[in-house]
Amino acid sequence: MLDYAALAALAAVVREGSFERAAKALCVTPSAVSQRVRSLEERMGCALVVRGQPCRATDAGRRLCQHVDRVHLLEQELQGALPALAPQGPARVTLPIAVNADSLATWFAPAIAGFAAEAPVLVELSVDDQDHTAEWLRRGVVLAAVTGTPRPPAGFNSRPLGAMRYVAAASPAYMARHFADGVGAGSLARAPSLVFDAKDDLQARWVRRLCHRDVPLPRHAIPSAHAFVAAALAGMGWGMQPQALVASHLRAGSLVEVVPDSPLDVPLHWQHARAASSVIDGLTREVVAAAARALLPP
């Protein structure tokens, strides 16, 4: 039999990133967490955690983390079917999900809020670029993710959600200052752009399509979807904005397209653990329905 107290300690270390934070989450001492993980590693005969900042699961550790998350979902479902197991009702289960910031700022938050209001879950969101959220699945940190990758990792299902439309936008004053003579490789190489973080390549992709070559872009890094819009409104730079987030600014004229009628559509996919769980099934229905209302058809 597996030691589920030790498995819970392992999952907490991977999720929290350190033994100290895992101990706080589990309401035990760091030495207890360390002892549980060490005993599990001795039984498995291999390392399960790469100690570092943050701590990361090894391949074997990822498999065990995914297993314990699925067990928690199945236990909750069993408690719902057999009330005698949980007289006060099924315990809330933590549901770790990865999502890109622009989806979270537009269509995903209402979907997950509606689901969490009805389901006995505690949602734990991790935010990353849509081209990197699938890595959270492979690492065993989350059970589901909104991702730009169509092919899921082993043990996960994938379904298309639709495409999020982005527009290259800037303030009229910024356009007059930096693009008075037109938008091209030369002016783009001089004009400050906005990026979410080092992983954000949407601006580079749009420029590559426009100019048919790579152009080195000066960049301000603004790691917040709403601050990204505010920075563009203030004339700090141009950037690829989710159309749904800036539609009112475009109508009002406080933002304008850098090159009219040149959107960039980014396909999104929903990937989730291949587990027979009504919680995962219900979450999937909510996410797919919300995406159908907000995104371009897949």
Image (spheres, rainbow, N blue to C red):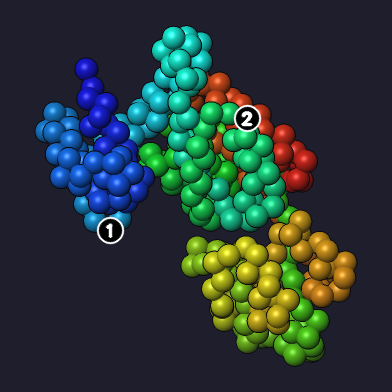
Q: Is label 2 in a helix, a strand or a loop?
A: helix
Residue 67 lies, in percent from the top left, at: 35, 27
Name the residue tied to disc 1: 53
Name the residue tied to disc 2: 118
Residue 98 lies, in percent from the top left, at: 51, 45
Quadrant location, the C terminus:
top right
Callout 1 amino acid:
Gln
Of the residues tagged 1 and 2, which is closer to the observer? Answer: 2
Q: Which of the two residues, 154 or 118, is positioned nearer the viewer here?
A: 118
Q: Is label 1 in a helix, a strand or a loop?
A: loop
Q: Residues within 10 Å of mark 1 (few under 14, many from 20)?
A: few
Looking at the image, residue 44 lies above or below residue 267 = above
Q: Which of the two residues, 119 or 214, is positioned nearer the viewer here?
A: 119
Q: Residue at x 47, y 30 (%)?
A: 92
Q: Residue at x 68, y 44 (%)?
A: 110
**From where the camera sits, is residue 243 visible?**
yes
Quadrant location, the N terminus:
top left
Q: Residue at x 66, y 76 (%)?
A: 231
Q: Residue at x 40, y 26 (%)?
A: 72
Q: CA distance from mark 1 to mark 2?
A: 36 Å
N-term mark: 1 or 2: 1
Callout 2 amino acid:
Glu
Based on the displayed image, in which of its 4 quarters is residue 278 positioned?
top right
In the rendered structure, the answer to whether residue 173 lies left or right of residue 137 reads right
